[in-house]
Image (cartoon, rainbow, N blue to C red):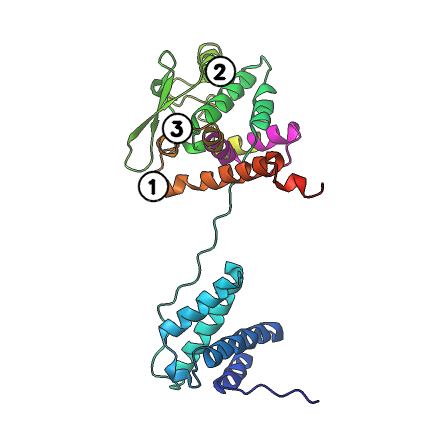
Amino acid sequence: MKKKERKIVFYEISDFKYHLKQLRLSENTIDAYISDLIQYEEFMSEYEKIEDVNDITREDVNKYIQSLKRKNLSKTSINRKIIAIKDFHKYLLKENITRENPTEKIDNQKADKALPTVLSIDEINKMISSINGDEPLDIRNRAMMELLYAAGLRISELLDLKQEDVHLKEKYIVVKEGKGNKDRYVPIGEMAVIALRKYREEVRPLIAQKSVKNLFVNYKGEPMTRQAMFKYIKKLAADNGITKTISPHTIRHSFATHLLEGGTDLRVVQELLGHEDISTTQIYTHLDKSKIRTIYDNTHPLGNHNESK
């Protein structure tokens, strides 16, 4: 039996296809546009009983987007379909086929934030412990890495620290934040204190230029640069067999994640990181939850580890 052809409800799709060809788009791109629009047309015809593009409202478009979400499509796929629908309605309005554009205030779906790369506690310890030389730059590097992890600093905050910002006896540092130039007081642990004291007493006086106020300086006695720190951390990771793509900010991510895993309150982590909005800090709860899921799957009697039994 010959398959019954589907009724074309929005004949304007054919006109739009011709319009896309005039733009010299690739065949694959045009096919993707038309495929998305046919699905759109089918929804409007079947579920909203719409047969005239002039009758489509913003509410109808939103209903279609909700239907896509219910299908668990990725946000990238949904956004591709939204773009096709928007371009279609812009074309209809421009050609005076419709009186209004119902997609004018329709926003694309916000892409999920990629979870940051995090080092394990063992990986952090391995990196820092490997800096065990007695050369001046070894002592400096150990102090920088101990402090970077102990305080969860941004790389700019670490390199902008001045001598007077470090209070070893009281075990805290004062971070000058870029926004509003306000101070943030961050406690540091004993290992960072020991490393910093050794650097300040034995190394910095020998290499720092008198006019330089920055705590950390390079072999010329000038302030350390972001580029030098970035290269050093990547090399340190590689030398210790760590294949993750990391940067100085990875140490900060690891600091926050390890605190949450240890039971630290989210608000405290927010203060330590200097986040103005707690929603910025909440990304680390996703990392923590993923670890909780792994632990659950590996230990709970009905976890995934039992599926093969």
Label 2, label 1: how far apart the Cα atoms are = 30 Å
Q: Which numbered marker is on residue 160?
A: 3
- Residue 74 seen: yes
Q: Which residue is pictured at 49% across the width and 23% down the height?
A: 144
Q: Check disc 2 and report its element: helix, strand or loop.
A: helix
Residue tagged 2 = 191
Residue at 51 percent across and 66 percent down: it is 80
Residue 196: image location, x then y, percent: 45, 16
Which sits earlier in the primary sequence, circle 3 or circle 2? 3
Secondary element under disc 3, as helix, strand or loop, is helix
Mark 2 vs 1, N-terminal side: 2
Name the kind of residue labelled 1 in the image: Asp
Q: Amino acid at mark 2?
A: Met
Q: Nearer the viewer, mark 1 or mark 3?
A: 1
* Relative image position of residue 297 (x, y in whole percent): 60, 39
Look at the image and give the residue range highlighted in magenta.
233-256
Would you identify the image quadrant in which residue 281 lies?
top left
Residue 277 bears which disc, if any?
1
